[in-house]
Amino acid sequence: MADKPETSFDNIDSAREYVGLLCEALEEAKGAVGDDIALARSEGATRRLEALQLVTHKLDALSRHLDTSHRLLNDLRTLRRLLLRDRGGSR
């Protein structure tokens, strides 16, 4: 049987790292949208400004979800370590 290729979700640690990278990329996107908002505001582009404000709202919601996921993965990693220590195993 052939080995499955590694993905970002092969284990809790790699999934946690991947979610962390997504959080960083999201912060960069929020900064770029903030710049676009300032430009739209200075140009008086009302519809574009409203759309960008909606984008900001959606990015904030996604950011909260990713932060929660990151914390949950941290908790799972901690629990896994505690369980392995109780079994006398190491990982």
Image (cartoon, rainbow, N blue to C red):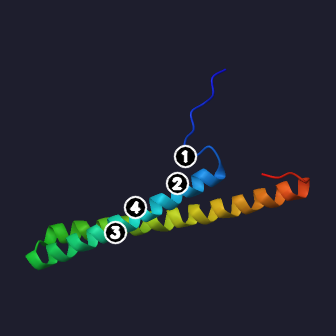
Residue corresponding to mark 4: 25
State the CA–CA distance, disc 1 to disc 3: 24 Å
Which of the two discs, 1 and 3, labels the residue nearer the N terminus?
1
Vertical relation: 82 (above or below) 5: below
SS of the residue under disc 4: helix
The picture places residue 46, in percent across and down from the top left corner, at: 14, 73
In 3D space, how far apart are the residues under numbered discs 4 and 3 (Cα atoms)? 9 Å
Give how far across and how far down residue 89 sits, in percent.
86, 51
Q: Amino acid at mark 2?
A: Tyr
Q: Nearer the viewer, residue 39 or 45?
A: 39
Report the Cα–Cα distance between label 2 and label 1.
6 Å
Mark 2 or mark 3, which is nearer the start of the sequence?
A: 2
Instruction: Give the amino acid at mark 3.
Output: Lys
- The mark found on residue 8 in the picture is 1
Position in image of residue 12 (x %, y %): 65, 52
Neighbour tally class for label 2: few under 14, some 14-19, many 20 plus, Cα within 10 Å: some
Assign a secondary structure to mark 1: loop
